[in-house]
Image (cartoon, rainbow, N blue to C red):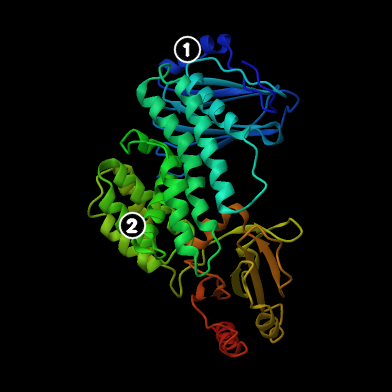
Amino acid sequence: MQHPLKLTLWFSIGFLMMVEAVTAQGYTVVSGRVKGHNGEQVSVSWWSEPGVSQAVTEEAPLQQDTFCFRLSADQVREGFVYVDAGSAGNFYGMLRAGDSVQLSFEEDTMVFTGRGALACRVQYLARHVQERIPVPVGEDAVSRAAWHREQLRVAERMLKVYRDSLPPAVYAVVRANVLGETAGKLVSCLWRIPQDSNATAQQATLYQQMIRPALPAIIPSDTTAVAVRYLNYLLQKAEADYFMQRHSQCTERDIYEWIKTHYTGVMRDKLLAHHLLQSLAAGGQPEELARCAEDYLTLVQHAACRQAIATKYDKLKKGLSKGAPAPPFTFPDSSGHNISLNYFTGKVVLLHFYDDSDQLLPSLAEINACFNKDDVVFVHICCNNGAPRKYPGVQLQAGGQTAGILEQYNISQYPGLIVIGRNGNIYATRPPDPTADHGAALADIIYAALLQ
């Protein structure tokens, strides 16, 4: 089947015969061709426990326009793989241990064949028909909800065509992943309603009349728990259901308790782990999340979930304390040059984590003027995708590493300030707000660090 798309995926029969011996040994093979891109990098990422484990990524240069990755059985059991060939295109699909796929990136066709091809093809086709639904002109909640409802309808119709062609478990995961992604977007329309005196009533009407009736009927199970986008949807639905019942916004602890009482088994374990990991990555309140993690470790049965949360809990208990080595990082500055923390060894460093709402420019400019730049440096880390601001000192962009750096420095809200001594160790983790006293207390802390 051919489609007018920029991305072309070709799974060749000859290739499948060639890798037969490899796949028989439990390997999942991902290979392909990117015509005209010889020498450029291509990467493949995979998840052994989607929603719980972090993605593992390998990169390799294209040799004669081709690439090949062999993933062992312990790396890919049943989950998702993402192939990124840069501007030439990308591919996201489901694979199982022993599957073999070859991708050929051309211009405007996509052909699927091979052992792991059908599940990928079904997922692609369902998403493709969704993309054909015109984006609504209006940005309001009702227009967006109607759009996502239609996307769910056409995707479900496409999925049903292949229901009998896939093993039941595979079909369940593919369906949960495709519909879960769109259902999550539908639920998020609830928060598009402007917050005024009538907001609660309008949200209740939208949810009861447009959102809830259109949500896919997917049974939460050990099987559907494999689909990470379905897990994301269930977290969003939990927040919406909590809001509809209590008519108030929920905390991370509230969502945690809601999931505990509404799910069981592996699905409960994975949802709670996914929720905690997402909250930590987003810079949630460390104390509250530590209490949730401690409780979670008393009830979790799933081994991978237990290991993931136990590791995070250990880090939360250790925290970021005075005298501990400052976590290292390397980010690009405003000119695109990579700057590492160790570049400033021998100086006192004020780390300033900020987003678009930051109001510290006047105060930090005033404090910065009090110190010699050879002794003290202000390092400003932009934690959103906006353009770095012109603060006094060094401007850095966290980009895709934002979640990691916020977790390492226990930053749960903006602005976040950390003082690092000349020796590279933490000197102050929560210095006073400089806007409260024209920066006097913060300046005193920096002076003390200089004298250390």
Front one among 210 and 171: 210
Amino acid, disc 2: Tyr
Q: From what the image shows, is residue 279 above or below residue 173?
A: below
Residue 318 shown left or right of residue 432 in the figure:
left
Q: Report the number of numbered marks.
A: 2
- Residue under circle 1? 20
C-alpha span from label 2 to label 1: 45 Å
Residue 76 visible in the displayed image: no
The residue positioned 42% from the left and 21% from the top of the image is 163
Amino acid, disc 1: Glu
Please tell me which of labels 2 and 1 falls first in the chain.
1
SS under mark 2:
helix
Image location (x, y in percent) of residue 382: 64, 64
The residue positioned 33% from the left and 36% from the top of the image is 219
Q: In front of the other: label 2 or label 1? A: 2
Residue 37 shown left or right of residue 402 in the figure:
right
* Residue 23: quadrant of the picture: top left
* Residue 148: quadrant of the picture: top right
* Residue 239: quadrant of the picture: bottom left
Q: Residues within 10 Å of mark 1 (few under 14, many from 20)?
A: some
Image location (x, y in percent) of residue 285: 42, 67
Q: Quadrant of the N terminus?
A: top right
- Residue under circle 2? 256
Q: From what the image shows, is residue 33 above or below residue 420?
A: above
The residue positioned 44% from the left and 51% from the top of the image is 207
Q: Report the residue that reaches farthest toward the left.
A: 298
Image location (x, y in percent) of residue 428: 50, 78
Q: From what the image shows, is residue 338 above or below residue 271?
A: below
